[in-house]
Image (spheres, coloured by chain):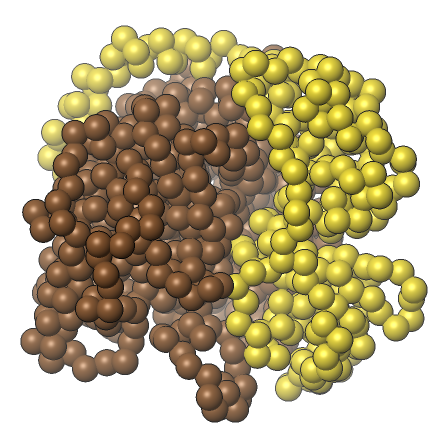
Chain colours: A yellow, B brown
């Protein structure tokens, strides 16, 4: 993300009519692409037609996990191809798929407790707190913290911390303990949503009313109204305050 | 960081903010909503659907002679990817009760409910399961759950939003099933935003008269899709998922029944035959057709494949003349051009203002009305802000006002995706507004269905964005997530029950041959091929050097 910011600043100063070209290496092979492109834009500009490694293109689906290095740093960097702006001489490869185990379970038969994770995803407890997962997360989530929360049995916190996870798999690809963090997290959220979150009364009573056909007659009337009458009804309806 | 020349305009936005905030906090409407006549005027003058070349007469198929969106007409007036004579129809690769085409929210819901009703299911999907517009929806899902609301009031809102063209039986299904869907999703473990007492946190959506927008931060679609995908994967014995294998034609039998589909393995380039007693099309929308050259919020795979499959086999289209442009697409920074800025930003109080900082429209009109008024502000009235490189024009969406209404931290808590998105480009939306312009968002029309998701063809169902009718000619916020859940579920049930009765005859592809003949007879000479499957973003100069590459339509 730091890279993005420096590029943006450069662009403002120069405001080129036609974008300046920069070099980068796609799987070790050099290409010239316009400065300011996203990695995904650069791949397509270079001539790749993407089948794997491309999804929503807006940072929500996790299809375009990418690993790269830059010349000024020894560190491995990670990002989403659709969200990361290219920098000169970056060395990149997409990870279109990474093998990951997903446990099979019937949510109705699970308990929202630590023992469930001990049973379903025992490798969770192999976490060595190295924080590599957190560093790899393109959403900047506290991945290690949610794994640690689960190890303590705090499902609510794990659910909260992992909420914005897009399941790109970069955490699992980097984890020395071979945990599949994003699959563990989806189970944590499901257990929280189903069992631990407080339930309101309104939904229950509305379902009862619907079962008793309380609104059928009124809807039926609307369905058979002529256009002018229904229009009148619509524009006369009161709108609740924000 | 916005360029220097925008600073003057940004100051004006700040200057008018206290007055706008005062009005917002007072509870009265910040701007007078439009009357029926005013809505009509702004739509006909500024909505892209009303441009002279927006629609053209389709010359073949069940809707022949009807005016539909030009890009869709071209897509339908195209050749098949295959020559039916190449296929040995006695060689069936998979036999199943229910084939679901599409792995988004509608397809996943259909598969789960079909399974619950005793069917063996195959989901065939073009990319990965979950790769869909469902995953990307941000703002929320409508359901009348609060005591001051009812399915009947919801019905009225849906109808007004759709300009009273909606199919009544579909709207009834939508609003009546809505609370049931919320319950179903909660039991599957979707984490909705809640009040401290456990009741659902609900907000007011555009064109709605009650607070019934349920959300999961601004990852609502992802929160739902992640759970549905996880649940589908829990049943490998009953639901088989075939990824990277889009359907390219339906199969039929000699009795005129739909009988499955031909899939195309994108990686090995094989064709695969799936025979199914019931077939559900849940392929999603058409944003990647880039209608009227608009940027889009849609998924890479949103190429309306299902329209082609259904139409070639003889299913009807409904309201295929209507396109939804979401009012708030990003226009700056240019890397995120066309990206969705969720309507939740406005439901939380953000206001659209012009370059002088003036509010010029009620922030929560139905989407087509809101979009048209943005376009009017940027064109006829000339009060938009121009971007530096591409020269696009937009208006400000004043997001900082949200935290003045709801308190500090509200944006990061409730709009983390939006905050993250702009922060990646060094714009802090808690301090600076967003520059927006309408973006291609949703396919209002589609394959015609009834409230059991049946098309007019035996054994063929459709659900979600690919179907048409429930939203009339304009969908309201939060009704698409609802749509794919309600009708995905209904399609799954109906398809499973149907599969128990069906006897299939000898397979044919005669409908593909017949369609090809119709093309010839109508004098349509074209090299277009559909379904498109994927858009092509290879630059023309690269294509010019691909001297021995073979393109089938857009696909290499």
Q: Is residue B260 left or right of residue B370?
A: left
Name the quadrant of the N terminus of chain A.
Answer: bottom right
Marker count (numbered):
0
Look at 13% across and 61% down and name the residue there.
B510
Q: Residue at x 90, y 35 (%)?
A: A128
Frontmost residue, B438 versus B540:
B540
Percent coordinates x, y for residue B216 in the rendering: 57, 33
| Above or below: residue B143 compared with residue B16 | above
Q: Position of residue B424 (x, y in %)?
A: 73, 57
**Closest to the observer, B13 or B176:** B176
Residue drawn at the location 55% of the way across and 40% of the way down = B222
Q: Nearer the viewer, residue B172 or A152?
A: A152
Q: Would you identify the image quadrant in which residue A104 lies?
A: top right
Relative to residue B395, is residue A81 drawn left or right?
Answer: right
Residue A171 visible, this orientation: yes
Seen in the picture, residue B56 relative to B115 is either above or below; the reply is: below
Q: Residue at horizontal 68%, vertical 62%? A: A94
Does residue B425 appear in this view? no
B105 horizontally vs A97: left or right: left
Q: Is residue A145 above or below residue A19?
A: above
Up the image or down, B272 lies above or below B181; here it is: below
Between A174 and B185, the residue placed more toward the observer is A174
- What is the x, y in percent for residue A241? 48, 28
Q: Give x and y (percent) for residue B287.
A: 41, 60
């Amino acid at each position: 993300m730091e890279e993005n910011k420096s590029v943006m600043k450069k662009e403002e100063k120069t405001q080129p009519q036609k974008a300046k070209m920069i070099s980068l290496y796609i799987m070790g092979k050099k290409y010239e692409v316009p400065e300011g492109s996203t990695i995904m834009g650069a791949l397509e500009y270079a001539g790749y037609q993407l089948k794997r490694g491309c999804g929503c293109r807006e940072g929500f689906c996790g299809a375009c996990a990418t690993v790269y290095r830059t010349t000024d740093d020894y560190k491995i960097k990670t990002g989403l191809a659709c969200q990361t702006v290219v920098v000169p001489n970056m060395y990149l490869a997409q990870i279109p798929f990474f093998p990951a185990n997903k446990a099979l379970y019937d949510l109705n038969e699970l308990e929202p407790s630590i023992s469930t994770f001990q049973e379903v995803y025992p490798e969770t407890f192999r976490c060595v707190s190295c924080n590599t997962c957190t560093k790899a997360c393109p959403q900047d989530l506290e991945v290690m913290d949610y794994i640690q929360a689960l190890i303590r049995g705090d499902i609510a916190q794990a659910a909260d911390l992992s909420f914005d996870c897009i399941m790109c798999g970069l955490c699992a690809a980097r984890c020395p303990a071979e945990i599949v963090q994003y699959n563990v997290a989806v189970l944590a959220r499901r257990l929280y949503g189903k069992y631990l979150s407080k339930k309101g009364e309104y939904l229950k009573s509305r379902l009862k009313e619907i079962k008793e056909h309380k609104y059928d007659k009124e809807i039926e009337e609307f369905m058979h109204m002529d256009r002018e009458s229904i229009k009148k009804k619509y524009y006369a309806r009161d709108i609740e305050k924000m | 960081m916005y360029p220097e020349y925008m600073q003057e305009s940004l100051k004006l936005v700040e200057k008018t903010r206290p007055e706008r905030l005062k009005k917002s906090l007072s509870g009265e409407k910040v701007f007078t909503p439009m009357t029926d006549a005013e809505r009509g005027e702004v739509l006909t003058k500024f909505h892209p659907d009303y441009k002279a070349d927006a629609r053209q007469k389709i010359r073949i198929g069940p809707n022949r002679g009807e005016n539909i969106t030009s890009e869709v007409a071209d897509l339908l007036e195209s050749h098949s990817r295959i020559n039916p004579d190449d296929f040995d129809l006695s060689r069936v690769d998979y036999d199943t009760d229910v084939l679901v085409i599409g792995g988004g929210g509608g397809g996943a819901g259909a598969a789960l409910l079909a399974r619950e009703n005793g069917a063996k299911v195959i989901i065939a999907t073009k990319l990965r399961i979950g790769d869909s517009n469902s995953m990307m929806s941000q703002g929320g899902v409508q359901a009348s759950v609060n005591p001051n609301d009812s399915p009947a009031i919801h019905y009225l809102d849906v109808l007004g939003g759709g300009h009273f063209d909606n199919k009544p039986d579909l709207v009834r299904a939508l609003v009546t099933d809505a609370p049931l869907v919320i319950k179903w999703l909660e039991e599957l473990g979707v984490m909705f935003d809640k009040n401290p007492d456990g009741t659902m946190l609900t907000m007011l959506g555009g064109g709605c008269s009650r607070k019934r927008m349920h959300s999961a931060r601004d990852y609502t679609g992802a929160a739902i899709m992640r759970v549905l995908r996880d649940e589908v994967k829990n049943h490998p014995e009953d639901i088989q998922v075939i990824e990277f294998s889009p359907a390219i034609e339906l199969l039929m039998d000699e009795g005129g029944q739909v009988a499955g589909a031909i899939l195309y393995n994108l990686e090995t380039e094989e064709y695969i035959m799936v025979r199914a007693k019931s077939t559900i099309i849940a392929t999603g929308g058409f944003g990647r057709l880039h209608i009227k050259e608009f940027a889009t919020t849609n998924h890479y795979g949103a190429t309306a494949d299902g329209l082609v499959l259904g139409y070639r086999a003889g299913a009807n289209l409904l309201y295929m003349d209507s396109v939804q442009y979401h009012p708030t697409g990003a226009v700056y920074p240019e890397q995120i051009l066309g990206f969705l800025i969720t309507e939740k930003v406005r439901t939380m109080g953000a206001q659209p203002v012009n370059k002088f900082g003036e509010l010029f429209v009620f922030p929560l009109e139905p989407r087509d009305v809101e979009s048209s008024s943005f376009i009017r502000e940027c064109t006829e009235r000339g009060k938009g802000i121009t971007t530096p490189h591409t020269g696009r024009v937009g208006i400000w969406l004043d997001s900082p006002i949200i935290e003045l209404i709801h308190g500090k931290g509200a944006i990061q808590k409730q709009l983390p995706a939006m905050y993250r998105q702009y922060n990646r480009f060094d714009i802090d939306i808690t301090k600076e507004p967003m520059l927006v312009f309408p973006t291609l968002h949703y396919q209002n029309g589609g394959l015609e269905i009834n409230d059991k998701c049946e098309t007019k063809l035996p054994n063929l169902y459709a659900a979600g964005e690919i179907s048409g009718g429930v939203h009339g000619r304009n969908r309201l916020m939060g009704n698409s997530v609802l749509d794919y859940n309600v009708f995905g579920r209904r399609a799954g049930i109906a398809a499973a029950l149907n599969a128990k009765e069906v006897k299939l005859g000898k397979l044919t592809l005669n409908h593909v041959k017949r369609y090809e003949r119709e093309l010839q007879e109508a004098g349509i000479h074209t090299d277009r091929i559909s379904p498109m499957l994927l858009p092509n973003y290879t630059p023309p100069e690269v294509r010019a050097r691909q001297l021995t590459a073979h393109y089938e339509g857009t696909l290499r």
